[in-house]
Image (tube, rainbow, N blue to C red):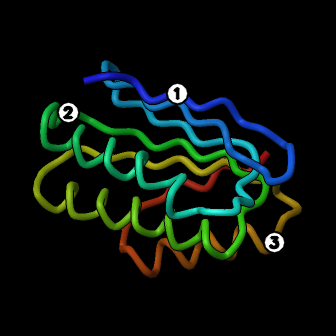
Amino acid sequence: MENLEIEGSHKNFFIPSVSFNAKTGICELSGESFLEDTVEFYKPLINWVEDYIELVHGPLALIIRLTYFNTSTSRSILDILNILKDYEESGGEVVINWHFDENDIDMEEDIDDYIIDTGLDINKIPF
């Protein structure tokens, strides 16, 4: 299984940086996510997570450091979190650390909504 690496960009749209490591199971998503076609961007990330679960079946850590994401990105993040919840319920080891600006009340509320919607333990880490 290959790593998934995408360099972030701030051109016409904001593309987040992605670093999913197949050896360690550490998956990092950082920057800003405001894309023209969110579904197309996040589909390889979702596929990678599904493949990791099926092929490696090891511990998986999702580290999110997004300073902004739009509504369509929110749905894609929820899709990933739901996959991780299913994996956890089937015995997989999952850790989610979400770093956020302590002054960004909206982001903290979004994280709380994800916790409620998925039932996952998401570690909120203010900076």
* Residue 40 left/right relative to 84: right
Question: Residue 58 got which mark?
Answer: 2
Q: Given this view, does label 2 or label 1 mark the residue nearer the observer?
A: 1
User: Element at badge 3?
Assistant: helix
Residue, x 18% and y 47% (percent of image)?
Answer: 92
- State the residue in front, 39 or 97: 39
Amino acid at the residue labelled 3: Ile
Q: Given this view, does label 1 or label 3 mark the residue nearer the observer?
A: 1
Residue position marked by numbered label 3 in the rendering: 105
Q: What is the x, y in percent for residue 102?
A: 82, 57
Residue position marked by numbered label 1 in the rendering: 5
Amino acid at the residue labelled 1: Glu
Residue, x 51% and y 64% (percent of image)?
Answer: 39
Amino acid at the residue labelled 2: Gly
Question: Residue 42 got which mark?
Answer: none
Residue 9 lies, with reference to residue 36, above or below; the image says above
* Residue 75 left/right relative to 61: right
Q: Are there few (<14), some (14-19), or many (20+) residues within 10 Å of tag 2?
A: some
Q: Are marks 2 and 3 in contact (CB under 8 Å)?
A: no
- Measure the alpha-carbon separation of dots 2 and 3: 34 Å
Q: Are there few (<14), some (14-19), or many (20+) residues within 10 Å of tag 3?
A: few
- Which quadrant holds the C terminus? top right
Q: What is the x, y in percent for residue 57?
A: 15, 37
- State the residue in front, 88 or 83: 83
